Image (cartoon, rainbow, N blue to C red):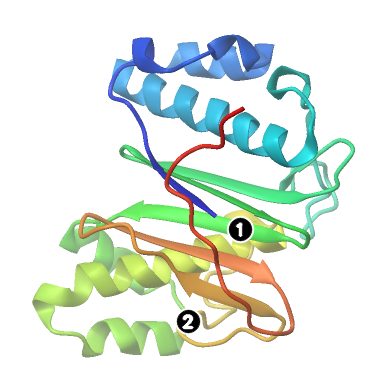
Amino acid sequence: MWILRAPETSRAVSDLTVLDETERRRMAAFAHDRVRALYGFAHVALRTVLSGLTGVAPGDLRFTRAPCPCCAEQHGRPVLTPAPLEFSLSHSRGLVLIGVAPTPIGVDAEVLPGPEVVEELTRTLHPAERAEIEAAPQNARRAVFARLWARKEAYLKGLGTGLGRDLDADDVSRAVPGWQLTDLPVGPDHAAAVAVASPVPHGVRIHRTLPTG
């Protein structure tokens, strides 16, 4: 598991040449340089991590999509081709998460939302999740909501459904059968989580710098 901080300008992102045509096009489409920098850094970092684990040069890595569990179309979770590893990527306002595992994995990072977003989206969650948020002191609800939302999105990314699955279908405030959900230490402005398909608990090893060499 990699927890990284992105540079603030795209000029500070190293070796954008490893990105493929689709990634470069998406990066160029962002209006703000800070957002371009975040996207570029995240995707270069992902390729750097996967290259170190597979021995394939960063620019030679190829990606596709697994079938969606909801509709069987090819827009499920991203996978390597060929796929010796599962991975997940998330980035949010300067923070980048990269998770890698031998089984399906999802990661998610969230900036703490405003009170109006908390109020609106809490209604869409599982009853147990709603109860946990509503039981929290008013000044703590943003953090409680963000923690649960990050766990929810990480789990749904691991499943490959994304937000195509009903948000009230699963209770991620506690253990989910067949999955390990772990909150990640990312500071007071974000919440983050990783979900790994695993029938038994295991540790999460955290790196805060990219592999070199």
Residue drawn at the location 26% of the way across and 59% of the way down: 117
95 shown above or below 109: above
User: Hey, what amino acid is under mark 2?
Assistant: His
Image quarter of residue 150: bottom left
Q: Quadrant of residue 180?
A: bottom right
Label at residue 126: 2
Kindly tell me whether residue 133 is visible in this rendering: yes
Between 21 and 198, the residue placed more toward the observer is: 198
Q: How many numbered dots are placed on residues in this image?
A: 2
Tell me if mark 2 has few (under 14), some (14-19) or many (20+) residues whose alpha carbon lies within 10 angstroms of its own.
some
Q: Which is in the foreground here, disc 2 or disc 1?
A: 1
The answer to whether residue 18 is above or below residue 5 is above
Q: Kindly identify the amino acid type of the residue bearing the numbered disc 1.
A: Gly
Q: Is residue 24 left or right of residue 128?
A: right
Task: Please name the residue shown 32% across and 65% down the image.
Answer: 146
Q: Residues within 10 Å of mark 1 (few under 14, many from 20)?
A: many
Whole-percent x and y of residue 151? 48, 68
Residue bearing mark 1: 106
User: Helix, strand or loop at disc 1?
Assistant: strand
Q: Position of residue 175 (x, y in %)?
A: 56, 87
Residue 185 drawn at (x, y percent): 35, 63
Q: Between residue 19 and residue 134, name the one nearer to us.
A: 19
